[in-house]
Amino acid sequence: MTPASFLTLPASKPDPIFAAAKAAKAAGPQAINGTIGVYMDEDGKPMVFPSVRSALEDIAKELTRRSYSYPALTGLAEYRTSVHHLLFGDSAPLIASIASTGGTGGVSLNIRLAKLMDPAITLILPTPAWANHAPLCRSAGITTVEVPYLEDGLPSVRGVMDALQRTAGNCCVLLQVGCHNPLGLDLSTAQWNEVLAAMAKKRAIAILDFAYQGFGGTPDEDAAPVRLFAQSDVLTLITWSASKNHSIYSERTGLACAVVPDEKTRIEVEAHYSTLTRGIHSAAATFGQSVVARVQSTHRDQWLKDVAGAREMLEKKRAVLKETLPASFRKAIDGHGMFAMLPLSEEQVDRLATDEKVFMTRDGRINIAGIPLKRMEELAEKIQKCAR
Ligand SMILES: Cc1ncc(COP(=O)(O)O)c(C=O)c1O
C-alpha cells in the first residue's frame, strides 16, 4: 500500500441525517431545519433545560475538585443508580449496567452482548428504524432481518411475530420504546403484550431502545414497556439516552443495562459489558453522567417540569400541523415525540429544500422539535405548496 491506496477505499456514504443537517445550515438562518434530532427553543437554538442549567452551575463550582483519573469501565455509580431509578422507579429489579457513549453506544453494547450469547443469533429489526440501527448491527457483525413496522400506515407487530416463527435459531428483537424515530408512532399496550408473549414463547432476547423518556408521556408512563418486559421471563436488555431528555447531546451520555436473575450474573454481565467497551473505546466520558446524576438528585422537580414543557410544546406543534395540513397527512403526524415521517416523495422533499428552504431527510422524516412553534403554519403552507 502507498498513500495512493486511499483511493481504493470504497465510496463513502454520508449519514443521511447529518448530510441533510449540513444542507440546512448552509441555507442560512431563515431555513426551516427539520433535520437532526435536537430540541430547539423558539429562537432556533438548542434548548438547555433549566434543571440542567442549574446542575451545570453546581458542577462548575466543583470542577477543580473533580477526579480526572480514569473512571471505572462501568461509569459513575451515582449516574447508573439515577438511571436505574428513572427506568424502574422505586421497585427496580436486579440490573447489570454500564454507562455508554450516548444511547448509540448503549445500543452497540447490547447488540454485541446478545451476539456474545450466541454468535449465530438473528436480530429482527422492524423498519423504518432509526437511521443508525442497521449500521450499528452491521458494525457488530450480527445477522439482521428487517421486517415491516407499519401496516396500512399504523404500527404493527405482525412483521416481528412472523419473523420469530420463521427463524430457526436464537433471535433478538430491537424495539424502540416511546416516541419512535423516525415515525413518532408507537406500539399500543396490547401490541406490547402480544409481542412479549411471542418473544417469551420463542425465548427471544429483547433489546429495548429508550431514547426519549418523558417526551411522549410522563417519564413513568413512557417506561411502561420497559417495566413490562423487566417483569417477564424474556431476557431483557435496555439502552437509554440522556441526549434529548437532559439536553446534553454533545456529552454523549447513555446507559446499557440487562435485567439479571441473581447477583452472580450481575457481576458476570457487568464484566462482559466492561470487556466490550474496553474493546471499542474504553470507558464512556463522565461529565454528562455527573450532570444527569446532579439533575436527578438535586433538581428533579424542575426536570419533571422541563420534560413536561417539552412534551406540551411538541403536542402544540403537532396540533398546528393537524389543523393546517390535509387529511392525507393525519396518520403520519398523529404520533408523539420529536419526529414524523411525512407522506412526501423524494422529489417533493428536494423541491421543499430548493424552492422553500425547508429541510428534512429524503424519506420525509421531519424533526418537529427543531422548528419553532411560530413557524409551524408557514411550514404547513410550504409543504402543501410542494406536495401538489
Ligand atoms: C431511537 C434512537 N436510539 C438511540 C439514539 C441515540 O442517542 P444518542 O444521541 O444518545 O447516541 C437516538 C438518537 O437520535 C434514537 O433516535
Image (cartoon, rainbow, N blue to C red):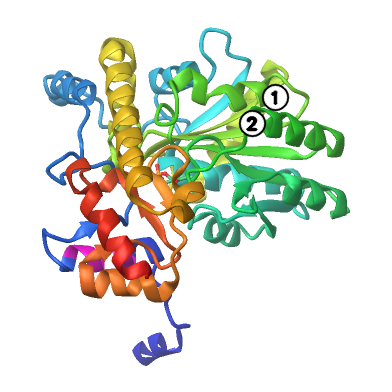
How many numbered callouts?
2
316 left or right, relative to 169? left
Q: Name which residue type carries label 2.
A: Val
* Closer-to-camera residue (167/101): 167
Q: Magenta stretch?
A: 19-25
Q: Nearer the viewer, residue 354 or 70?
A: 354
Q: Nearer the viewer, residue 17 or 85?
A: 17
SS type, badge 2: helix
Helix, strand or loop for disc 1: helix
How far is the residue under mark 2 from the one under mark 1? 6 Å
Residue drawn 16% across the image and 40% down it: 42
Magenta-colored segment: predominant secondary structure: helix
Q: Position of residue 26 (x, y in %)?
A: 16, 68
- State the image coordinates of residue 148 (x, y, percent, origin top left): 67, 56
User: Does the magenta run of residues contain 10?
Assistant: no
Check the picture and name the quadrant holding the N terminus. Answer: bottom left
For disc 1, the marked residue is: 265
Q: Quadrant of ligand 1?
A: top left
The residue pinned by badge 2 equals 269
Marks 1 and 2: in contact by CB < 8 Å? yes
Mark 2 crowdedness (10 Å alpha carbons): few <14, some 14-19, many ≥20:
many
Q: Going by the image, does 374 lie left or right of 216?
A: left
Type of amino acid at the residue the image marks with label 1: Thr
Above or below, 324 relative to 220: below
